[in-house]
Image (cartoon, rainbow, N blue to C red):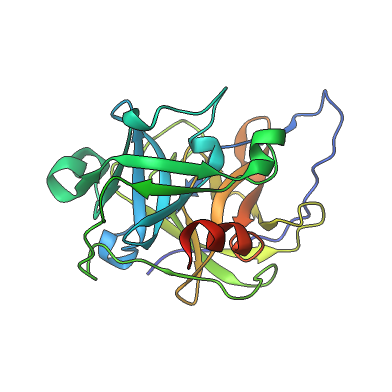
Amino acid sequence: MFKIVILTLVLLVFAPENSSRRLILQPTIINGDNVNITEVPYQLMLTYNKQFQCGAVLISSKHVLTAAHCLYQNGFRSKSKINIFAGVTKKSQRYEEGHMYGVKTYIINALFILTQYKGDIAVIYPDKKIIIDNYTVKPIALAKQSYRSGYEALASGWGLVDDQGTLPDNLQAAYIKTTPCIVFRDSICSEGYLNGICKGDSGGPLVYNNKLIGIARAKISIDGKCALQSELYSSVYYYRDFIKRYTRL
């Protein structure tokens, strides 16, 4: 059974420039459990230049969601260097376990291009249909309502698992509890103390009741540590018009 991460602190985002609290656009799983891809078959992996880059989420055989900052750093990243992996549990065995796809094109939310802060969500079109077996590869339904606060949701990914920079080979997952977002209307927030979410992997899913409610986006940390931090997820419901426009879902 996945660990339950209870998140209860208050989100503080406007701080002096010399404050040790800062935004990091690389969330991941701290104190999670090893899981098999069959438990989260909508989880995808993105690589750039053949190196692990981010998580992503399968929403149909033709459409993938991820965080915009996974695809846009000082300009648009070359689609020819991006690959999507489906059906993977162990990062080191992605070529043996999973199926690899190229990228036909991708759409980054216009708000992110303008501000590089809001609108941290993107739609990717694979170069061919992703093979769905409903076991290791299965799309997830999109949230039809807002899940802003008080929900125990499942996050997953391959990012750092501690403050020492340890990267897991096996896919990780943990339950978190969402809290009110005071400042970010487009986000779902969570707060942690000693365990929970940390830097390393963005673009992955936040799921409640078998519905995709958020895309891992950013965190606010203190002194770069994961012991005390705030986590942000781009709300799928908030960006439903953007998603529908480019996927028809």
Pinpoint residue 122: horizontal percent, then vertical percent.
52, 47
Q: Is residue 126 left or right of residue 205?
A: left
Q: Quarter-wise, where is residue 228 in the image?
A: top right
The answer to whether residue 36 of the structure is visible from this angle is: no
Which quarter of the image is occupied by the N terminus?
Answer: bottom left
**The one of 15 and 74 positioned closer to us in this rendering:** 74
226 displayed left or right of 36: right
Residue 142 is situated, as x and y percent measured from the top left of the image, at 50, 69
Compared with 177, 203 (above or below) is above
**Residue 203 visible within the image:** yes
Q: Position of residue 168 (x, y in %)?
A: 34, 41
Q: Residue at x 45, y 31 (%)?
A: 165
In the foreground, 65 or 45: 65
Q: Nearer the viewer, residue 184 or 189?
A: 184
Using residue 182 as the reference point, say whether residue 73 is left or right of it.
left
Q: How many labels, in total?
A: 0
The answer to whether 231 is drawn above or below residue 179 in the figure is above
Residue drawn at x 55%, y 41% is 68
Q: Position of residue 134 (x, y in %)?
A: 24, 71
What residue lies at 54% left-to-right and 54% top-to-bottom?
A: 215
Work out which residue is located at the far right of the displayed protein and give it: 16
Query: Which residue is at 49% across, 37% downward?
Result: 70
What residue occupies the far left of the structure in this picture? 96
Image: 55 above or below 179: above
